[in-house]
Amino acid sequence: MSTVTIHMLQRWRVDRQDGMTANGPEKLVILIVKALNGPEIAVAMSKVDAMAIGIQLQLAATDAQNS
């Protein structure tokens, strides 16, 4: 099992870009994050993955707020 190092987020942005998925051409969502003292990292995902991640982030933020 690998160990994950957690870094504080410095900045983020979301872009869109044409790309290819297993289902053919699709508009992809690009998440770009920059950690403190780290490189900027871009991850391409389908709109379905972006929606699922958005829901999970909202649930986690609500839980953190209520704790």
Image (spheres, grey):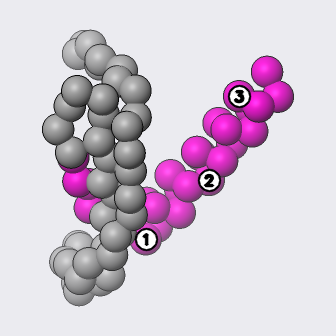
**Identity of the residue drawn at 38% across and 50% down:** 12
Instruction: Name the foreground residue: 12 vs 57.
Output: 12
Look at mark 3 in the image and give the residue it sits on: 64
Q: Amino acid at mark 1?
A: Lys
Q: Magenta includes 46?
A: yes
Look at mark 2 in the image and give the residue it sits on: 55
Q: Judging from the image, what secondary structure is the residue with disc 1 in?
A: helix
For residue 4, what is the image quadrant? top left
Question: How far is mark 1 from mark 3, CA to CA?
Answer: 25 Å
Question: How far is mark 1 from mark 2, CA to CA?
Answer: 12 Å
Q: Magenta includes 33?
A: no
Q: Amino acid at mark 3?
A: Ala
For residue 63, what is the image quadrant? top right
Residue 65 vs residue 57: left or right? right
Q: Which residues are magenta?
A: 41-67
Q: Amino acid at mark 2?
A: Ile
Look at mark 1 in the image and give the residue it sits on: 47
The location of residue 66, given as percent across then percent down, is: 82, 28
Residue 48 vs residue 7: left or right? right
Please tell me whether residue 32 is drawn above or below residue 62 in the rendered image.
below
**Identity of the residue drawn at 29% across and 17% down:** 5
**Identity of the residue drawn at 20% across and 78% down:** 19
